[in-house]
Amino acid sequence: MLAILDKKTQKLAVINVAGSIDALIHDQKFIGNLSKEDIADCIPIYRLLHYFPVEYLPRSSRVDLAMRALAADVLTKSFESKEEPLLEHVTEWRATCRSFLVKVVRETQAKAFEDVVFSALFVFHLTIHENAPSY
């Protein structure tokens, strides 16, 4: 099963999350050439992962999948434009990725250096005004 999870989310692994967040802050073009379809192909994996305790995954896989979910979340920002409203699917994609991210952050509690970097990136991304959830 881990091989399938890895294969289905592999496209997201090449995204430089920190660089993409920095591009968001400075209103620059995103680095990467993933399409909406590429992101859409990964979302069912994260829906499926909601049904499994994260302890079933090795810690390294948890961090990898979480970083890829963060990459998908950050990339959804590139699908927005000032002229077009946000696609309804993109909102659901963000909710799916973010709920998985919250689950992983809560469970791992930043036990390793990679987890600390991941947690810091996640929190920073969520606090960017344009990306902050609206209540």
Image: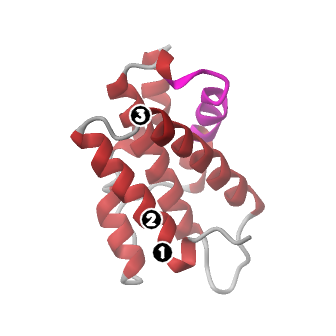
Q: Position of residue 121 (x, y in %)?
A: 36, 58
Residue underneath mark 1: 128
The residue at the point 64 percent across, 68 percent down is: 133
- Depth check, front residue: 48 or 36: 48
Instruction: Specify the label residue 50 is tagged with.
Output: none
Task: For the residues labelled 1 and 2, say whether their Cβ atoms are less than 8 Å apart.
Answer: yes
Residue 8 versus residue 91 in the image, above or below: above
**In this image, 29 relative to 133: left or right?**
left
Mark with earlier residue (2, 3)? 3
Residue underneath mark 2: 125
Q: Check disc 1 and give the amino acid type.
A: Ile
Residue furthest right as drawn:
88
The residue at the point 58 percent across, 71 percent down is: 132
Q: Which residues are magenta?
A: 42-54
Q: Check disc 2 and give the amino acid type.
A: His
Q: Secondary structure at mark 1?
A: loop
Residue 129 appearing in the image: yes
Residue 55 versus residue 14 in the image, above or below: above
- Depth check, front residue: 124 or 19: 124
- Mark 1 crowdedness (10 Å alpha carbons): few <14, some 14-19, many ≥20: few
Camera-near label (2 vs 3) is: 3
Spatial CA distance of label 2 from label 3 is 19 Å
Q: Secondary structure at mark 2?
A: helix
Q: Is residue 55 magenta?
A: no
The residue at the point 65 percent across, 34 percent down is: 44
Residue underneath mark 3: 108
